[in-house]
Image (cartoon, grey):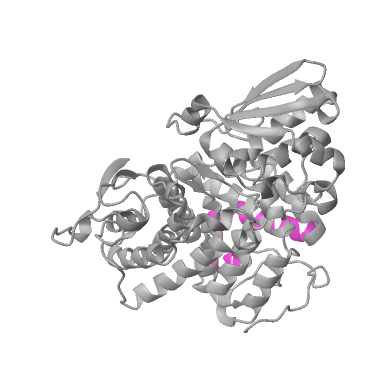
Amino acid sequence: MISHQVRVQTSGQSLERVEQLAWKIAEVAADPVPVLPEVREMVINRIIDNAAVAAAALNRPPVVAARWQAAAHPYTPGATVFGIVDDHRFSPEWASWANSVAVRELDFHDTFLAAEYSHPGDNIPPLLAVAQHRRLDGAALLRGITTGYEVQVDLAKAISLHAHKIDHVAHLGPSVAAGLGTMLVLPVETIYQAIGQALHCTTATRQSRKGAISSWKAYAPALAGKIAIEAVDRAMRGQGSPSPVYEGEDGVIAWLLDGPDANYLVPLPAPGEPKRAILDTYTKEHSAEYQAQAWIDLARKLRQLYPEVADPAQVESIVIATSHHTHYVIGSGSGDPQKYDPLASRETLDHSIPYIFAVALQDGAWHHVDSYSPRRAARPGTVALWRKIATVEDPEWTRRYHSNDPSEKAFGGRVEITMVDGRVIIDQIAVADAHPLGARPFMRADYIRKFRSLAGPALGEDEISRFLDLASRLEELTPDEVGRLTITAPPEYLAGSNPGGLF
């Protein structure tokens, strides 16, 4: 890897394009390096993972609305939309939109956390849609996904967006544009222009993940992918972008991020170096924000060892000592009263550690639907326990959260449960059980089991087997087979009449 220094340049300074971060990313995208076998296998895992969570979300209102929007844009050759039979094709940017919403809706697919937070599996829907539309084979799709993951992870390692209240999809627009450039074998110049447009048009505030969180949380990455597809289309037609988009005096860094004195070191693969960043990412066993994964696992353990912790009458208080991010984003440090509100939306509850820990303590399990139902959230005993839970920042867990050493990096913390009888129960957890360094790291069999569990009600065994066969042969797929790399539900399963809109 090469660490590239990125600084703001004044208008009086001349920054050659070859020295700009967008150009260096474009060079990585255009570098025709082979895909490592272990990377290929992980890409397949994540395609299966995306399909699993999308299948489980097919009838949720945001997904239904996005699917109807896509259905209003039929196109030939076009791309498929999850749930709809694969001989129906739609404009690729709209197919990407609908599929991205389905993947993101349950907050249940993969994650990478560093200086910035990300769900790099969000790269897959727009890349798949364009691959189907352009009739590309599986090997091309594989290369594109590998690049998308590499660019988003590398940006997330170096440039914090959330520190300035910018949403993490500002790294997704450039990564999708870069992945499309790889997949379509575009020149560096074209990819560079597309990256600039994609970044410029995908910067938005983090209010989508603050306060009363709405369905827009699922739509945010879908919009970034759609914008990136449109940016590539314009760049292929010879149209330009703001330049330098990162380093410019009035650019993203100067005005939205660390300001004119910023100095970042962005790691990118050296020429000829394989792209392996997907191996640094991890998926979710539970449908909740990633920092909640380890806490669900710890709560399940504590429920087995000390059943009395589930009874609010026996619990005096619960204090969770954790990282800065967990405390301030999904903990009581956020100051959001909604995180303790039984009437809060599902999107808010899955960003509330106090709620999640209370329910997991009481149920000893987690379910992507049942654990969030209004009836479950309003249970008096749950509300009583929930409101006894608070988070605090612990500097050591913050340090471990930001560690660059994979063996030390942690997303958990320490819990202290004070019982009414005076006992104090203390335990801690560093990473989720499903994490590569966890108690039960996710392997291919786990991804398949997750897919079968989540997709079974929607798809049925024949469709599940058909999809798994295609996904497992990704690198060998013909263009026709890539065109069928989707999930189809029986028409009677898909709920919801067209809610109506402009289209």
Q: Residue furthest bottom?
A: 503
Is 130 a magenta residue? Answer: no
Residue 431 visible in the displayed image: no
Residue 413 visible in the displayed image: yes
Along the line of sight, the residue nearer the viewer: 400 or 94: 400
**Image x and y of residue 223, in percent:** 53, 66
* Picture layout, residue 195 above or below residue 307: below
Rendered residue at 45%/44% (across/down) = 277
**Image x and y of residue 419, in percent:** 78, 21
* Picture layout, residue 483 above or below residue 33: below
Image quarter of the C terminus: bottom right
Along the line of sight, the residue nearer the viewer: 69 or 445: 69
| Span highlighted in magenta in the image | 461-483
Is 466 a magenta residue? Answer: yes
**Image x and y of residue 395, in percent:** 49, 27
The prevailing secondary structure element of the residues shown in magenta is helix
Rendered residue at 34%/78% (across/down) = 237
**Image x and y of residue 250, in percent:** 28, 62
